[in-house]
C-alpha cells in the first residue's frame, strides 16, 4: 500500500487466489497468494532492451499492472517475428503460455541458456519445467505486475515515461513440491 496505492487497491479487490510479479531488476517471476505470501519464484529472461515497451520491435518487456489474458498450450505454436517472418520450428514458446498482454506472455523456452539474461523480443521466459508448475496457478483475469528494474527506470525517465517501481522483498524461493501438495 505504501509503495503504490493504485496497485494495492487492485490487489485488495483481487478475487483470484494468486497473483504474479515479474521483477525485471532481480530477473525473477514470483507467484504470491492473494495475501501477499510468496509461493514460488523462478529465474527468467526478458526483453533485451531496458525500459517500458513503447512500440513494435523495440525488444522491451512492457511494465505495469496487467490481467492475465489466458493460459494456453503452446507446444505447437510457431514464432513469428515483428516483421512477419515465421520460423518453421515448433515449440519455441515451450509447453505453456500465460498471456500478459497482446503478443507478450510468460512462457517456457528451449533456450535454457537464456534464463537470467535480457535477450527476448519482449516476452518473459522461464524453464519449461517451471512453466508447467506455474501455469496451474494462473487464471484468466488474475493480476500480473511487471516491475521495472533500476536500469529500466533510468531509461523510462530519459523517455519521459513514469512506471511505478516496487521494492520486492528478497525472500527465499519456496520449493515447488511443497506447494504442489496444496493443489
Image (cartoon, rainbow, N blue to C red):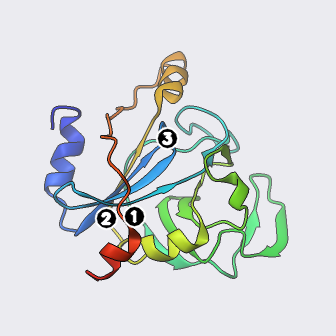
Residue 104 image position (x, y, % from top left): 56, 57
Q: Is residue 69 above or below residue 11?
A: below
When asked about the image quadrant of residue 91, the answer is bottom right
| Residue with the mark numbered 3 | 24
Tell me the tag on residue 68.
Answer: 1
Q: Nearer the viewer, residue 176 or 133?
A: 176
Q: Give the residue displayed 40% in from the left and 26% down from the top.
A: 162
Q: Determine crowd level at label 1: few under 14, some 14-19, many 20+ residues with C-alpha closer than 10 A.
A: many
When asked about the image quadrant of residue 29, the answer is bottom left
Q: Quadrant of the N terminus?
A: top left
In what element is the residue under mark 1?
loop
In what element is the residue under mark 3?
loop
Q: Earlier in the sequence, mark 2 or mark 3?
A: 3
| Residue with the mark numbered 2 | 142
- In the displayed structure image, the side of residue 12 where residue 147 appears, left or right: right
Q: Determine crowd level at label 3: few under 14, some 14-19, many 20+ residues with C-alpha closer than 10 A.
A: many
- Asked if the residue at tag 2 contacts the one at tag 1, i.e. Cβ–Cβ closer than 8 Å, the answer is yes
Q: Nearer the viewer, residue 7 or 41?
A: 41
- In the displayed structure image, the side of residue 87 where residue 39 appears, left or right: left
Q: Earlier in the sequence, mark 1 or mark 2?
A: 1
Amino acid at each position: 500500500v505504501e509503495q503504490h496505492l493504485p496497485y494495492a487497491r487492485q490487489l485488495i479487490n483481487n478475487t483470484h487466489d494468486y497473483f504474479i510479479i515479474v521483477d525485471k531488476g532481480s530477473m525473477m517471476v514470483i507467484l504470491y497468494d492473494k495475501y501477499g505470501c510468496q509461493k514460488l519464484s523462478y529465474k527468467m529472461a526478458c526483453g533485451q532492451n531496458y525500459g517500458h515497451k513503447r512500440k513494435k520491435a523495440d525488444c522491451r518487456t512492457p511494465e505495469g499492472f496487467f490481467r492475465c489474458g489466458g493460459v494456453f498450450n503452446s507446444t505447437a505454436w510457431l514464432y513469428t517475428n515483428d516483421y512477419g517472418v515465421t520460423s518453421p520450428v515448433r515449440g519455441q514458446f515451450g509447453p505453456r503460455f500465460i498471456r500478459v498482454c497482446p503478443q507478450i506472455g510468460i512462457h517456457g523456452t528451449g533456450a535454457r541458456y537464456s534464463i537470467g539474461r535480457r535477450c527476448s523480443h519482449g516476452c518473459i521466459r522461464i524453464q519449461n519445467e517451471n512453466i508447467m508448475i506455474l501455469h496451474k496457478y494462473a487464471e484468466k483475469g488474475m493480476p500480473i505486475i511487471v516491475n521495472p528494474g533500476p536500469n529500466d527506470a533510468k531509461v523510462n525517465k530519459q523517455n519521459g515515461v513514469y512506471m511505478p517501481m516496487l521494492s520486492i522483498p528478497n525472500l527465499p524461493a519456496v520449493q515447488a513440491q511443497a506447494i504442489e501438495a496444496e493443489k
